[in-house]
Amino acid sequence: MINRTLKLFVAAALLACGFTTQALAESQGCVAVKTTAEIEKEVVNDKGEKSKVLVPAGKVIPGTEVVWTVTAANSCKQASEHLTINNPVPEHMTLVPNSAFGPGSDVTYSVDGKTFAAADKLTVQENGATRPARAEELKFVRWELRNSLQPGASAFGRFRAVLN
């Protein structure tokens, strides 16, 4: 079992590197994929009105909810067709149920990185029986863009996960 200090170190290292190497665009070519980690911060404007903004995540402690944004940018001279982005839920984090979305995308999940489906359709084997997968067992998020990604355009997907 990883102790709390190591979890903080792992989380800080993970956030510092931007978690960019794990995202995958299946029709890579000249589509660049970048993943960023942010947390929500409450701010008050000069009228005293409160709102929430996303700010870069630095060191986070267990229980902190991190907002992960995956951006795909097309630098090709032609449209990128059938773009699919697979992104793992960071190690030592639990996906927040129903938090993943992406404008113009179909979002699915996976427990193994191979089989993707709606969260309520995924199952796992436990003690010789099949049962529905729990949120903490969902290890990958996939965004499949419904339309082509035009030259110079970008698309994004987002999900939330809590540091264990």
Image: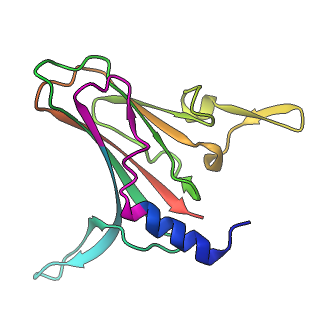
Does the image show residue 63?
no
The quadrant in which the N terminus is found is: bottom right
> Which residue is rendered at x = 74% and y = 34% of the image?
124
Position of residue 25 measured from the top left corner of the image (x, y, whole percent) = 36, 30
Does the image show residue 92?
yes
Relative placement, left or right, of 5 versus 123 is left
How did the renderer colour the structure? Answer: rainbow
Position of residue 101 measured from the top left corner of the image (x, y, whole percent) = 37, 40
Please tell me in which quadrant of the rendered image residue 43 appears: bottom left
The secondary structure that dominates the magenta segment is: loop
Q: Is 141 located above or below residue 5 in the figure?
A: above
- Kindly give the residue lying farthest to the right in the view shown: 128
Relative placement, left or right, of 48 versus 13 is left
Relative placement, left or right, of 79 versus 61 is left
Please tell me in which quadrant of the rendered image residue 117 appears: top right
Position of residue 146 measured from the top left corner of the image (x, y, whole percent) = 30, 21
Position of residue 77 measured from the top left corner of the image (x, y, whole percent) = 10, 21
Q: Is 21 located above or below residue 17 in the figure?
A: above
22 is within the stretch colored magenta: yes
Q: Is 28 located above or below residue 91 in the figure?
A: above
> Which residue is rendered at x = 59% and y = 42% of the image?
138
The quadrant in which the C terminus is found is: bottom right
> Which residue is rendered at x = 58% and y = 69% of the image?
7
Count of residue discs: 0
35 is within the stretch colored magenta: no
Give the residues drawn in magenta, as a range.
15-33
> Which residue is rendered at x = 63% and y = 75% of the image?
4
